Image (cartoon, grey):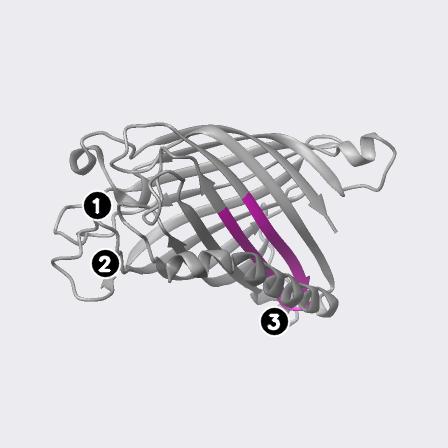
Amino acid sequence: MFKTKMRHLPQLFCVAFLGLTATAQAADWSDTSISYRTGNDYSEPFNPTDIKKNIFALTHVSGYKYGSNFFNADFLISDKNDPASLNQTSGAQEAYVLYRHTLDIGKLRGADIKFGPIRGVGVTAGFDLNSKNDVGYNSRKRMLVVGPTLMWDVPGHLNTSVLLLRESNAPSGAFAPISNVTGRYTYKTHAMLAADWGIPLSQLVSFEGFANFIASKGKDEIGNDTGAETNIDMQVMLDVGALAGGPKNTFRVGIEYQYWRNKFGNTAATTGNNGQTAKTPMIRAEYHF
């Protein structure tokens, strides 16, 4: 049944695209893009082997009178080193969806909140969802987030947030630690310090990314301690469309790097020092419309 659901992901992406198009029409400004990135050095907890992944994404950012929206849906396709649960000769597939809404308190009250290097104060809320058909864990993550946000007065944008996370999972893979839980397992509510940025370096080059520093979420499904996570993903992008004489911010390419320590809270102590830290260079291409 799950294989059938994975086959329906392109249709789900189309539905998401139509919904985002409607949202963009109601926004003061918006940017929607499709992207592709790939690398050979992805890691997964408990897996000692480097994994190649091809990742397709639909991303939407928009602003309206009282705040902004961010939506991203990744479709990740692994090679055989991260095998699928239903077919050992092919790689796992994963869908990961993230949504954040930031309400600008100054805009809501009709007077901007500015002090020092801060140009605005807001409240951010949202969710993460994922589904993966790997042979081991079969993640079904659900997470709610909420917390205050500072918007910094820099060229482009820089936001920092302190968020509370309420995360649960219902793994169903062949080696998932589900014997001690019934249905969905909820971790301890924990905090995350988050930053996201998009800083122009020139007319054609920008530096973009996010950094998440996540506190331990308590015990995992079988009673092991989880660890604090560091997840930093950054890229330098070149506007090759504008460079070739086309419209600005339409077709961009660049290089990306992700450092993810204690991925999903897994530590060297629980994984046998296999796959809990990823250091992944990538190439990236985006088309904006």
Compared across the picture, whether 270 is left or right of 134 comes to left
Residue annotated with mark 2: 188
**Mark positioned earlier in the residue sequence (2 or 1):** 2
Residue 23 visible (yes or no): yes
Identified by mark 1, the residue type is: Thr
Compared across the picture, whether 183 is left or right of 244 comes to left
- Above-or-below relation of 180 to 155: below
Within 10 angstroms of label 1, few (less than 14), some, or many (20 or more) residues?
many
Query: Are the residues tagged 2 and 1 within 8 Å (C-beta)?
Result: no
For the residue labelled by badge 2, is the local secondary structure a helix, a strand or a loop? loop
Identified by mark 2, the residue type is: Lys
Range covered by the magenta-colored residues: 56-75
Q: Residue at x 68, y 54 (%)?
A: 32
Tell me, for residue 108, which label it has, or none. 3
* Screen quadrant of the N terminus: bottom left
Residue annotated with mark 1: 226
Label 2 to label 3, Cα distance in Å?
32 Å
Q: Residue at x 26, y 56 (%)?
A: 171
- Mark nearest the camera among 3 and 1 is 1
- Mark nearest the camera among 2 and 3 is 2
**Mark positioned earlier in the residue sequence (2 or 3):** 3
